[in-house]
Image: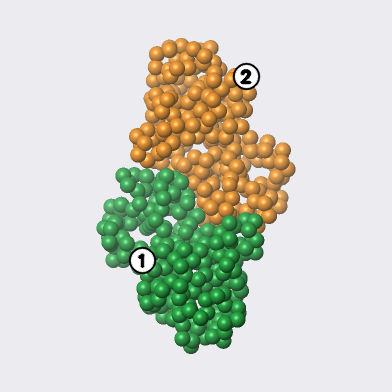
Chain colours: A orange, B green
Amino acid sequence: MADAGWPGCSKSLKGVVLDMCGVLYDSGEGDGVALPGSVEAVKKLKASDLQLRFCTNETQATREKFVAKLQRLGFDICVSEVFSPAPAAVAVLKERGLKPHLLVYDGVLPEFDSVDKTNPNCVVIGDAAEKFSYQNLNEAFRVLINLEKPVLFSLGQGRYYKETDGLKLDVGVYMKALEYACDLKAEVIGKPSPMFFQSVLNDMGLQPSETLMIGDDLVNDVGGAQHCGMKGIQVRTGKYRLTDTSGTRSPAARVCQEEEENMALCEMSPA
Amino acid sequence: MADAGWPGCSKSLKGVVLDMCGVLYDSGEGDGVALPGSVEAVKKLKASDLQLRFCTNETQATREKFVAKLQRLGFDICVSEVFSPAPAAVAVLKERGLKPHLLVYDGVLPEFDSVDKTNPNCVVIGDAAEKFSYQNLNEAFRVLINLEKPVLFSLGQGRYYKETDGLKLDVGVYMKALEYACDLKAEVIGKPSPMFFQSVLNDMGLQPSETLMIGDDLVNDVGGAQHCGMKGIQVRTGKYRLTDTSGTRSPAARVCQEEEENMALCEMSPA
């Protein structure tokens, strides 16, 4: 692959982890739209000697439906390559014997089919979008406030994401809302949780230093990966905004100055 | 008045400020319900030589409609005795030449009739309850995120309040949501803002040390008043929960240990 333009990790690089929404495509009505050059970039990465995984905080659909959408957009991708928070949450719930009250998008509900949801003793929130009504948030709040030891799991902690018709509030905003309402700290499942990145590294059999994360979110993609010892690059597509790197509005911008090689995915795929 | 049971301020006490929801009444369907003994307590306070004011973070109705409701519940109360955040916000907006995007309950909209709302350059949120839909919160977010210097005013910062059918999320929860989404700090208008308490003290012509605040919210009523040098007492009605004072869940409980004489308003009105 081409060394030029890759930030100081090309020689040792053995694996690439791609964020999806904002890097491969913009979500929106129907399937959304693939970003120019991204289908080809994935094809080139797959043809290279690098391992490739996809790591998303997408929680509006099951992995199966989500991958089918990406395939319709033209991407060469399969379910086993994709890491998302809902299956990771199910594993945690079962391990700890917890029964969730779910405030998630209808599309992701089947992921939780195998979990006992009677007499809930914790709350799980995902990117519920329109389901984040006052009534539904109040219902989740009442479950938490009536528990002796309230436990809140948040499938990601993103602030907002980009759809074809503009920026939309993400699950992290409602996580902060419930944290404040109940005076508690949520447990984040998904990016930037180190456990989540580690599960991807384990699957590839690679060390963090051999792996590069590419995403459009400075905190959850780039910062989260760097926190684990991985390399991180932010693309200039998706939710990227000029102020991410100007330092005037987002202190998070500074965490990845070293890696700051912002560009679209298609510009930095291997030759 | 009876000295016994009053926490160390009865001799110098010249004025009482009462919170309303949870102290005088529980809100709910229709007008809600007056708390037992509260109508008589207000009557006795008015017959005493103490000055009396009402200080609410209520933002679901104009002061006129709100006071009419309290009158129907049997309270001896008039508009000029009531301090609420919306009129205070209007004063701040005009002073700073700001044009608000409003995310408030329909009932309070008339308070903002005199304010220019074209091309908004700030956002004002109140206790919008069911109007806190995903769509409306997203709309407020988009106004803020597109401003060069985003300004968010929150009419109070309460976590939750009690209606006749249970606890409900308050405006502070959505303030935290937008603060996180936009990486900003909101300006709170209403309790516990010192400016808000000072305006009540000015109206009574009293010093903070001569004045007692009675409320059901440890942080916004009791803590806010104490921060201004006033005395503060928490009642055991409204949103009061045992954990408020146990120290296991609410660190705020400790701010008012000195004044901790929790009881219903009717138990502590002057003889």
Residue assigned mark 2: A205
| Residue B63 visible | no
A154 or A63: nearer the eye?
A154
Compared to B31, does B176 lie above or below?
above
Crowding near the residue tagged with mark 1, few <14, some 14–19, many ≥20 C-alpha atoms within 10 Å: some
Q: Amino acid at mark 2?
A: Gly
Crowding near the residue tagged with mark 2, few <14, some 14–19, many ≥20 C-alpha atoms within 10 Å: few
Compared to A141, does A252 lie above or below?
above
Task: Say the numbered circle drawn on residue A39.
Answer: none
Residue B92: x %, y % from top left: 32, 62
Quadrant the C terminus of chain A occupies: top left
- Find residue B183 and report its image quarter: top left
- Find residue B55 and report its image quarter: bottom left
Q: Secondary structure at mark 1?
A: helix
Residue A39: x %, y % from top left: 45, 22
Q: Residue at x 68, y 41 (%)?
A: A93
Q: Residue at x 57, y 43 (%)?
A: A154
Q: Using the rendered image, report if marks 2 and 1 lie on a common chain.
A: no
Residue A164: x %, y % from top left: 40, 37
Q: Amino acid at mark 1?
A: Ala
Q: On the rendered structure, is A157 left or right of B110?
A: right
The alpha-carbon separation of the residues under discs 2 and 1 comes to: 61 Å
Residue A18: x %, y % from top left: 50, 25
Residue assigned mark 1: B88
B69 or A5: nearer the eye?
A5
| Residue A252 visible | yes
Compared to B10, does A177 lie above or below?
above
Q: On the rendered structure, is B248 left or right of B14?
A: right
Q: On the rendered structure, is B145 left or right of A173?
A: left
Nearest-to-viewer mark from 2 and 1: 1
